[in-house]
Image (spheres, helix red, strand yellow):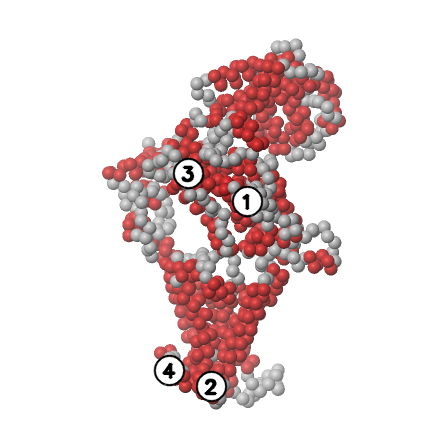
Amino acid sequence: MEVFDNEVVPSSLQSIAPILRVAREIQNERPRVAYLCMYPLHSISMYTLISGISHFSSLVSLLIIGRFYAFEKAHRLDPTSSGRGVRQFKTNLFQRLERDNASSLASRVKKTDAREIESFYKQYYEQYVVSLNKGEQADRAQLGKAYQTAGVLFEVLCAVNKSEKVEEVAPEIIAAANDVQAKKEIYAPYNILPLDSAGASQSIMQLEEVKAAVSALSNTRGLNWPASFEQQRQKTGDLDVLDWLRAMFGFQRDNVRNQRENLSLLLANIHIRLIPKAEPLNKAPVDALMSKLFKNYKTWCKYLGKKHSLRLPQAQQEAQQRKILYMGLYLLIWGEAANVRFMPECLCYIFHNMAYELHGLLAGNVSIVTGENIKPSYGGDDESFLRKVITPIYRVIDKEAKKSKNGKAPYSNWCNYDDLNEYFWSQDCFSLGWPMRDDGDFFKSTRDTTQGKGAANRKLGKMGKSYFVETRSFWHIFRSYDRLWTFFLLSLQALVIFAWSDIPVSDIFKKDSLYNLSSIFITAALLRFLQSILDITLNFPGYHRWKFTDVLRNVLKIILSLAWCIILPLFYLQQSNSELFTEIKRSLTFLDKMKGIPPLYLMAVAVYLLPNLLTAALFIFPMLRRWIENSDWLVVRFLLWWSQPRIYVGRGMHESQFALIKYTLFWVILLCAKFACNYFIQIKPLIKPTKIILNITHVQYAWHEFFPGVTSNYGAVLVLWTPVIIVYFMDAQIWYAIFSTLCGGVIGAFDRLGEIRTLGMLRSRFQSLPGAFNTYLVPNEKAEKKKFSFSKSFTEVYFALTFSVVSPSKRSEAAKFAQLWNEFICSFREEDLLSDRKSPLTHLFCFLIGSSCIEN
């Protein structure tokens, strides 16, 4: 009898795959037992079962002969055969069973099917399960497989006895089944580490770093177990700190098993790097892992001005246990968080409160509210953390996702993960309390999508959780690139003024043209006023989430920019004779050295440029800017509050000093070339024709005069300058394409990109490849000291340019590369990228003499 493989089982019926596997394994030894593992049917409707099956008469006869278990289970999982491939699978399985019924019945040893399956179960338990357990060093894989097979056989046995109305199962079989059920959990499949008692003999568990990590997790000294867990603790006797966390906070059993292995591997990977390796896990690997796991959490607490909940006792042994408890708690929260993982600061909030409860449990603190010892707010019932903490938050995410209407709804009508996570970037999140209040802003702001349309619904529509709401407008072209547009406009104004003055470039600081050039600051103030208006206009849909400080900042920016739009033109044009202006002029006599510029205007420009000078200084020194953005000083926070909204992410993320210098140098050269071309080729040649056109007063038109009442020639000037202005704003892309090509070509030449273009060139350079491989991919035995440098060290550059050939004294390094190369070739062969004939030829030494090898 041929039994279906696991690969043909539909995805919706994967739970019957173990039954088919057992049937396939025992079909040669006991064909009838294998048949019983596959055959239905018990207490289900005949007409629903044969949906899609035309063999009605054959089915009736088979129903009289026996009961089939796998088919029955498949039908219970999908009664209507609506799953993909289920109907075809049922039909093929039924036809196979109908064909093999007679042959399997002839090979039956006992009189009835119940006796047959019972006899084989006893035989299998004695010959496989018991004998494998008696071995000196039990094979875990074989034992796990045997226990799974025995569990499936007992399941089929019970189904057959029920179908044949056998009143009870033999006591020895019940005892064997109980033993199999208990041991099946112990020998359950695992990922990397067999952390149960049966896996102690495995070779991976004999590694020093693994034993040290497992021993550290097993330290439960001083932990008070709940009364409901004492019985299980006494029965198993090998519970660790993660089991204690599950008992106290109600995590899922499978989550605990996964995170136990995760935490053990993390500790072992850090411990393996220690020289020498300490048998008991020491402080170094625990502190290293703890700093990595809680880096974001500590930053979040510092950002919100809260003290973190990672409180440690004085004793070193207790402190290490406490650290492992904190790390285990965080990993268990993360492992059970589901989609909430995309909201890392929400996880920080959950951990902050649960870590505080953990500290209260261990220290015996008394709650201020109840006056009793602190206990977990959500209890330690099974899956209580998932049901009471994660599920309410997930419902919020689910409702917001439904509002998006598969991405068709406007962005302002729903919130994504980032919008929801931003709620936990402010101290408002602590208003949720712990346990979290159902009427908190985070839950209350999610409105029901089933509400009807109307005024009330529109009012609720203003309640959102997003700090940024997109406004689709062409003004975003100017607002998003405001610095670029401002720079181009001010540069155009300066170039036109300088060209109109008709003075040499060398005399720009010696003539009164500085007075005219200084008018660009008035233009800058007007552009800044327009920018402040765009800021509040384009962010207007998100006004309901603005705090008072946000509103105050935007209003003050508008008022200040408007004030500068009045002050700068006033000082630029007005020469007042009042006593106040006279006294100010006398105190600013040192500014008279700037010929042609009013001292008051010069002073106003200096004050106006102070923020820009500060911004330029921070741009030149990114290390200073990084420190300022991460600082909590009130003065620094006020400056940052004025410049931009304070947000949690993205602070202190800037380029290195060397990258910034290269970037600045690139754009300085590009813009110098652009402005030189604009000035000498586009702008300056148009100044003389423009002056001539403006000076023309009487024109005799040979054709019809379209605007007879116009006395000026500004329209002609506009037509003359429009193409030049358009080219001026667009040619930056052309210059960028030219300079990026040149710069990329130089960098590629130094990096030797594209140097090897043929297989012959590859073979000729192949001997230098081990040197580069060992330089860049193999770690050095001596740890390199980290030093600040603007470029790579001379040795790295030397290897990058030369790829020196491996000397005979470094044959071990060449052997390392040969091993790696040959592994690549073996992988190509396994994936059928190389044939059997070409595979030996591409191994390292054959490849070096490729042509002659092929010829021979």
Under tag 2, what secondary structure? helix
Callout 1: helix, strand or loop? loop
In this figure, which residue is indicated by the disc labeled 4?
590
Give left or right: position of 510 versus 105. left
Q: CA distance from mark 1 to mark 4?
A: 70 Å
Quick one: label 1 or label 4, which is nearer the N terminus?
A: 1
Q: Residues within 10 Å of mark 2 (few under 14, many from 20)?
A: few
User: Which residue position is annotated with label 1?
Assistant: 366
Between discs 3 and 4, the one toward the N terminus: 3
| Residue 323, picture quadrant | top left
Q: CA distance from mark 3 to mark 4?
A: 71 Å
Q: CA distance from mark 2 to mark 1?
A: 69 Å
Q: Could you tell me if residue 269 is visible in this image?
A: no
Look at the image and tell me in which quarter the C terminus lies: top left
Q: Is residue 250 left or right of residue 747?
A: right
Decide: few, some or many residues near mark 4? Use Cα within 10 Å; few <14, some 14-19, many ≥20.
few
The amino acid type found where label 4 is placed reads Phe
At mark 4, the secondary structure is: helix
Q: Can residue 557 be seen here?
A: yes
